[in-house]
Amino acid sequence: MANASRQVLWEYWGAELKRHRENAGLTQDMLGEKVFVSGGYIGQFEQAIRRPQLDVAIRIDQVLQTDGFFERTWRKLIDDQRYADYFARVVELEAQATSICEFAPTVIPGLLQTPAYARAVTVTANPFVSDNYVEERVSARIERADIFNRETPPEYWAVLHENTIRTAVGGPATMADQLEHTAKLMRDRTGMVTVIPYSVGAYPSMGGMLTLMEFADAPPTAYTETSFAGMLLDDPAVVKRVQRAYDLIRLAALPPAASLALIESAAEGFRRCASTT
């Protein structure tokens, strides 16, 4: 489902929420109190600025006595088999973000990946699946980068650990292409990418992948991911802590020019290796 058509359906979801809420004689604050979110969040749901969590949709059905309507439509809108269940909402938010900041300790972030690199990552994680499965997920991952072609693309920052540029995912040729692609995005000023070198040793937030997203008309959101699960965080106090962690991560990285030089040097090394095999 294209982002535009999905957005229209979320707007319908929000309009129905407003209609049922008003028919029940509830203000946004009153409904928010009953479903354990702020009245401001209810307003953002109604305007299709922010997507509710499933448990919130279920509680809305219970309070407004809508016989599961909001849960069923939520599941239909969120369901995209090309993405893991925990990641589908992140893709929706990426398309709305004005700023995206990522930290990648082991794998190049999906928004920067080439098809060959994405294919190698997918096959490595799913060695027994069909070619169709792999290609669907590769297509979905590459499609996400369309946000850089928007009239007003998001401001994009990524901090990579040196692991991500030294590990030959897919072999030397695939890795050389990936790093050259990343360097081109940096030179074109599509995004700002910096690298935490091995020489730093211990670094802040030595865990999994981290993403921070900011929006024009909604509070910031954070997303964290490990090998088998991801978590979307929108509690303001938690997001503030994540933002501080990201600031410390960014301080540990090399400056942009030195990071670009390191990425280009790694690309040249992989290219030479590929030419001799």
Image (tube, helix red, strand yellow):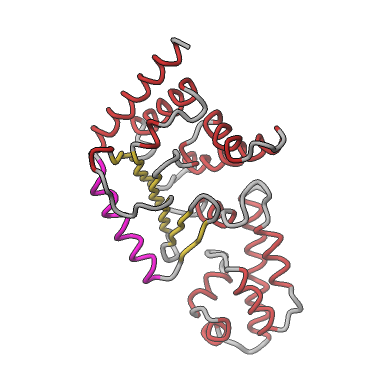
- Kindly give the residue lying farthest to the bottom in the view shown: 25
Q: Which residues are magenta?
A: 236-253
Q: What main secondary structure does the magenta stretch of the protein show? A: helix
Question: As rendered, which of 275 and 113 lies closer to the eye?
Answer: 275
Percent position of residue 121, x then y: 54, 36
Say left or right for 200 vs 227.
Answer: left
Residue 62: image quadrant is: bottom right
Side of 68 relative to 116 (left or right) = right
Q: Is residue 174 left or right of residue 249?
A: right
What residue appears at the point 48 percent right and 20 percent down from the top-left corner? 173
| 14 w.r.t. 37: above or below | above
Q: How many marks?
A: 0
Name the residue nearer the viewer: 242 or 272: 272
Residue at point 56%, 70% (across, down): 45
Q: Position of residue 87 (x, y in %)?
A: 56, 54
The image quarter in which residue 273 lies: top left
Vertical comparison of 86 with 34: above or below: above
Residue 7: x and y in percent read 62, 57
Among all residues in the image, which is located at the extreme top?
Answer: 276
Q: Hey, which residue is sitting farthest right in the picture?
A: 67
In the rendered image, residue 159, in percent from the top left (x then y), is placed at 34, 44
Asked if residue 48 is positioned above or below residue 63 in the image, the reply reads above
Residue 248 included in the magenta stretch of the image: yes
Left-right relation of 58 to 268 = right
Check if residue 122 falls in the magenta segment: no
Which sits in the foreground, 106 or 119? 106
Q: Residue at x 43, y 23 (%)?
A: 176
Q: Residue at x 33, y 60 (%)?
A: 243
